[in-house]
Image: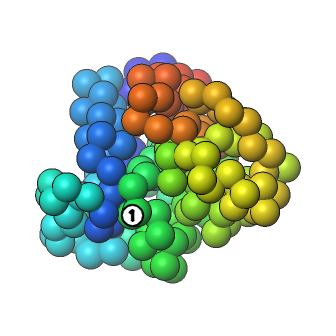
Amino acid sequence: MSLVGKRVAVLVEQQYQEMEVWYPVYRLREAGCVVELVGPEAGKTYASKLGYPAKATLSAADAKADQFAAVVIPGGFAPDYIRRSPALLALVRDAHAQGKPVAAICHGPWVLCSTTALKGRKATCFHSIKDDVTNAGGTYVDQEVCVDGNVITSRTPEDLPAFVVAIIEMIRKG
């Protein structure tokens, strides 16, 4: 299945980890996807941990899971802000419920901890939040990428190549 025209939501909020937003954005665009940066407010610029700007192209309130082939959740400290947004959580919950790929890297699984997406699933993450993953009903595994059902997780920026390959493969399977 071609990825040309497939829409993917990459979530943005302040204090995101630069590589965990931009590497997936560019790789997914290279694969033919239309990538939307989804944040609490459309048109607002969110600064990364180092101040690199990411301008939201779509507000979370206007983003509906059925518009997207997948949702990507970056790490950094952004997940702590993302999980405070009812609209962003609804997007993640709905995408998961619809069986769409929901991919989270590093601290991104914090967002999944605020949903039921991890219950009964294996997942990986940055080691400091493994207790949160376990307390959310997941089974922590230490590997570069973990795919369990429609949930894709990775640990750190070093895992990005395997993380994005897993996202592309799952979108391709449709």
Give the x, y percent position of residue 111: 56, 62
Residue in the image at 42% along x and 50% along y:
74
Which sits in the foreground, 149 or 109?
Answer: 109
- From the image, which quarter does the C terminus lie in? top right
Residue reaching furthest to the front: 128
Residue in the image at 17% along x and 72% along y:
44
Give the labeled residue for mark 1: 78
| Dot 1 crowding, Cα within 10 Å, few <14, some 14–19, many 20+ | many
Tell me how the rendering is colored. Answer: rainbow
Type of amino acid under label 1: Ala
Give the x, y percent position of residue 143: 64, 28
Give the x, y percent position of residue 27: 30, 28
Residue 1 left/right relative to 97: left
Which sits in the foreground, 106 or 44?
Answer: 106
Residue in the image at 80% along x and 45% along y:
139
Q: Is residue 170 above or below residue 77?
A: above
Residue 66 left/right relative to 150: left
Residue 120 left/right relative to 54: right
Residue in the image at 27% along x and 47% along y:
18
**Number of numbered discs visible in the structure rendering:** 1
Give the x, y percent position of residue 133: 71, 55
Which sits in the foreground, 37 or 19?
Answer: 19
Residue 78 left/right relative to 55: right
Q: Is residue 59 above or below residue 2?
A: below
Q: Secondary structure at mark 1?
A: helix
Q: Is residue 101 above or below residue 82?
A: above
Residue reaching furthest to the right: 120
Q: Can residue 39 be seen?
A: yes
Q: Can residue 121 be seen?
A: no
